[in-house]
Amino acid sequence: ELPEEAAAEAALGGEAERRAGSRIQYELVRVRADLLEHALNYAGEVGIYRSRLEQQVTTINFNLGELEQTVVRLRDQLRKLEIETEAQIRSQYVQQEGVANPDFDPLELDQFSTMQQLSRALAESVGDLVSIQGLLTNQAREAETLLLQQSRVTTELQDGLMRTRMVPFSRHAQRLRRVVRQTADEEHKQVELRFIGAEGEMDRQVLERVLAPLEHMLRNSVVHGIETAKVRKQRKKPETGTITIALHREGSEVVMEVMDDGAGLNIKAIRKKAEQLKLTTKDARLTERDIMAFILEPGFSTAEQVTQTAGRGVGMDVVASEIKLLNGSFRMDSTEGQGVKFTVRLPFTLSITQALMVTVAEQPYGVPLPAIEAIARIPRVQLEQLMAGENPIYTYGGRPYRLQHLSVLLGIGAPQFPEELHTIPLLLVRSGDASTALITEGMQGSREVVVKAVGPQVGSIRGLSGATILGDGSILLILDVTALARTVELAAAEQPVVEERAAPEEDVRTFAMVVDDSITVRRVTQRLLERYGMRVITAKDGVDALSLLQENMPDVMLLDIEMPRMDGYELAQHMRNDERFKNIPIIMITSRTGEKHRNRAMEIGVNKYLGKPYQEAELLENIQELVGKFNPQRTSW
């Protein structure tokens, strides 16, 4: 049967399954690939909007909880107000009338004061609030139910659309067999092509782009690898050479192995040709793997004569570059006299996948769950002891994993763990022979994400496979941890370079932190200070400033008083009580110019107090005075 018919048969569940069930004739429809891509993108957008709605419903439920607490508090306050009002009425009646008739209750007459009437009205308002709260709670619960139902339908829709992108590798088996047969006939050789795991599926776009490199590797195996029948007989091999294509899934990657039982790579001939092309010298000390890498150079060929299939020097370099464009990896292994194995690893990145949220350098990142072999936690003390060694190894399930900081691999620098973090989470990742335990700073659970392609500026960064949009509208980068795991073998050599890049020459400019809840004030002040040659970092409130202070030590702080979450007074008091920050000079810039506000600031330990709008010259003079006073080494901005 035709390959298309075989693929359709497999998509419908296989012949045996169809015979077992009812004899239903499924109708096949040809649909343009771009229409399916658009439909899949729209399904992804629906998923994003659903997650945003879920986050909004969560926020509504949180606010309803706050409303409930407020109603309880208001009801308690009203009860106390009523008791106090009745007590005052009784007291006034006793003072006016005396105690001539102690059985007479003044509240039975029209002695209600305006205060008591207001308290009764407020009590009714509280009852109305309780009723509204109940209605809103019911509506929020119904919205959650609807979102859950929509989530199930959307997931089914996405899965169905994703299956339309996946095609069986066996669809192109006849094409590859034809390439091997034609090349073998031209070379007068006997070659058989075998498949292992060809029923596996691959993304249509990835498969179409990898076919051309795959065909070239097959031609290379026939032309350069497989010997003639006469030579194979002399070497006690079967006269018919065998090329095997093995396909299997490993984590978030598709692994394709192209193996032959030919003569293997001629290491001596490759080195000789490299010396002729001046890619190396006779005195250079190279390993076999270094020598094999020369065949990936443009224009490199060891063929003695140019033919239709070999000798033109255009081949393996194109194969390697095309696989690299697909964010894959390419590896060669050769045994002289036994054959060559090319291992191609391609990302099995779906548009919609489950991702684990991890924290690196206080920033969230997403890691596809299929790429993670296991998750472990290690005591902080034990991790520090292991990392003190030269080649730290963590053993899990009897398998050794090389320890490496995820932040170091991303080029961010060494991580800073919070003091309260006693156990450190590890991501155990395996890519081929590379088993790595990636050290993170925290995990925030998993969620379904829609992977979006990033532009060439971001896409060229090592270790990034895409990005997604979270429920709050923020962008989350998706990490390609399998690619990072492959680089860990070289990380020991690269780590000093990374650290050197992460810690550039000391910046001698004055470092100022501007803390204000107004984005306009922050920008204006930042531009002013930068215009005078300062280095500026901004924070929107005290909590944000404290987070930034964990990694930054400014020369001067410019604070506002009125800010959400933590105001200027609280931040200044916190800094003055902390040994690390108590010597940082603080200039408070606020619209509160009253004497009591100024006095409180000075009592806390604020060095200068300016009112808004401030004079630029006055601010700059104060900064220069304080920076020079607290850091005599600084003589300029």
Image: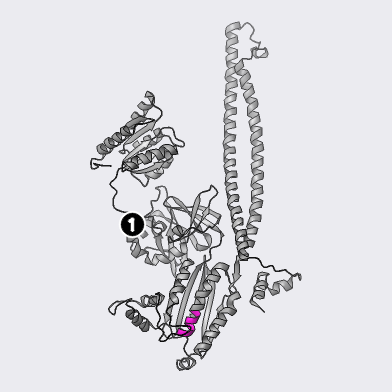
Compared with 333, 456 (above or below) is: above
Determine which quarter of the picture holds residue 540: top left
Compared with 298, 486 (above or below) is: above
Q: Where residue 235 sits: x, y (%)?
A: 45, 91
Residue bearing mark 1: 501
What kind of secondary structure does the magenta stretch mostly adopt?
Answer: helix
Residue 493 seen in the figure: yes
Determine which quarter of the picture holds residue 386: bottom left
Locate residue 57 relative to residue 278 in the image: left or right: right
Query: In the image, what residue occupies the spot 54% across and 85% down?
Result: 182
Q: Where residue 621 sits: x, y (%)?
A: 29, 34
Q: Please state which of residues 21 and 227 is positioned toward the viewer in this rendering.
A: 227
Q: Secondary structure at mark 1?
A: helix
Locate residue 456 relative to residue 182 in the image: left or right: left
Q: Please state which of residues 241 and 491 is positioned toward the viewer in this rendering.
A: 241
Compared with 470, 17 (above or below) is: below
Q: Where residue 420 sits: x, y (%)?
A: 41, 47
Asked if the magenta segment contains residue 167, the reply would be: no
Residue segment shown in magenta = 217-226
Asked if the magenta segment contains residue 218, the reply would be: yes
Q: Quadrant of the N terminus?
A: bottom right
Q: Dot 1: within a 10 Å radius of its alpha carbon, few (fewer than 14), some, or many (20 or more) residues?
A: few
Q: Please state which of residues 347 and 269 is positioned toward the viewer in this rendering.
A: 269
Q: Quadrant of the C terminus?
A: top left
Query: In the image, what residue occupies the spot 28% across and 38% down?
Result: 627
Q: Where residue 2 sits: x, y (%)?
A: 66, 78
Q: How is the image coloured?
A: one colour
The amino acid at mark 1 is Arg
Residue 396 seen in the figure: no
